[in-house]
Image: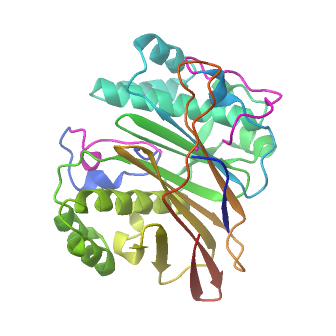
Amino acid sequence: MVAFMDQRKGTHGVEPIGRVLSSAPSTCFLCRAEEWYPTKRSARAAYAPSFVGLPDETVVVSPLMAAEEVRVTFRATAALDEATIAALFDVLSDEERARCKRFVFPRDRRDFVVAHALLRHTLSRYHPIPPRDWVFVSEAGGKPRLSGDCTGPARLQFNLAHTDGLVACAVSRTAEVGVDVEAFDCRTEPLEIARRYFSAAEAEHLRRCAPADRPGRFVEIWTLKEAYIKAIGKGLSLPLDDFAFGFDGLSTLWFTRTVSDAAWSFALFAPTERHRLAVAARTARVDGGPAVVVCALAPAHADADADAITIQPIRSCTVSVAGSAIANTPE
């Protein structure tokens, strides 16, 4: 099940879906390189260094995290100044700095730096390793994970995402997680892309949408799909029409796939008016869905004493698996 508390791109290590559609520079999420989310303020962790350049509220969380709990932190980036970005750049590894410098546009370099620094500081909230000391390696499918030196003591699963103006990271102790963020600034024709890559049901759903609603719904489906393939770590080796997301009413979300051997939780958020954030979490349990808590914390206001901003998902569901049967349970 998914339990939501007081709440709240880019694909790190996996070839972004958008790259197969276009390589032209653009703010459109289909046309740029990309990468791969805590609760309200509570007790400060034993080791919880401040996220340089951000209010302390963004790192004040309990060091305790249940085994199958997922915590996702997002951060808006457009208003960050050069001094803040430079301070965050300092926490990155040499390899991350080299990758950052390969981005052509300043906004992409900014979002890459903030996303990777956010991940490093977030991991350090749940295990006493300094942010600069985390070491990452890639799995066979390209999904990043902690190196052997870090995995033993930390045992953390994670995922990272950034898009123009927004970054996010997801952390869990046992649940396999995927997170994606997208902006509503795509100039691609949704129906054309959906017919080529989405399931028949998703393409038909988009066709039935009012023209004014279609681009937004397309982004929501795309964000959910990216979160799912990032969670399973297979990248584009899994066809996008092999699974489907659907929308009923104002808040119902459903998910179908022909074959599945795990229980899933999905959630879709609207962190800003121009962004969507999706989370996918999987465990090996098959009897009722993963016991996952998805918490979202936006950065505090400029006033360091202001309460943290929290939001609820706009849509969510759990998927439990019993043998080959898949049951969808809207939250």
Quarter of the view holding residue 329? bottom right
| Residue 202 to residue 152: above or below | below
Q: Position of residue 7 (x, y in %)?
A: 61, 47
- Helix, strand or loop for the magenta stretch, by majority: loop
* Quadrant assignment, res 38: top right
Q: Quadrant of residue 129?
A: top right
Q: Residue at x 32, y 74 (%)?
A: 202
Assess whether residue 320 is covered by the magenta stretch: no
Instruction: Name the residue: 63% across, 81% down.
Output: 321
In the picture shown, does residue 134 fall above or below 220?
above
Residue at 63% x, 74% y is 262
Q: Quadrant of the N terminus?
A: bottom right
Whether residue 234 can be seen here: no
Viewer can see residue 252 = yes
Q: Who is closer to the viewer here, 62 or 111?
A: 62
Query: Which range is magenta?
Result: 26-54
Residue 313 lies, in percent from the top left, at: 53, 56
Q: Is residue 170 left or right of residue 269?
A: right
Numbered label tally = 0
- Furthest-top residue in this view: 83
- Does residue 289 sit above or below 76 in this rendering? below
- Residue 59: give x, y in percent of width and height: 67, 29
Q: Quadrant of the C terminus?
A: bottom right
Magenta residue check for 38? yes
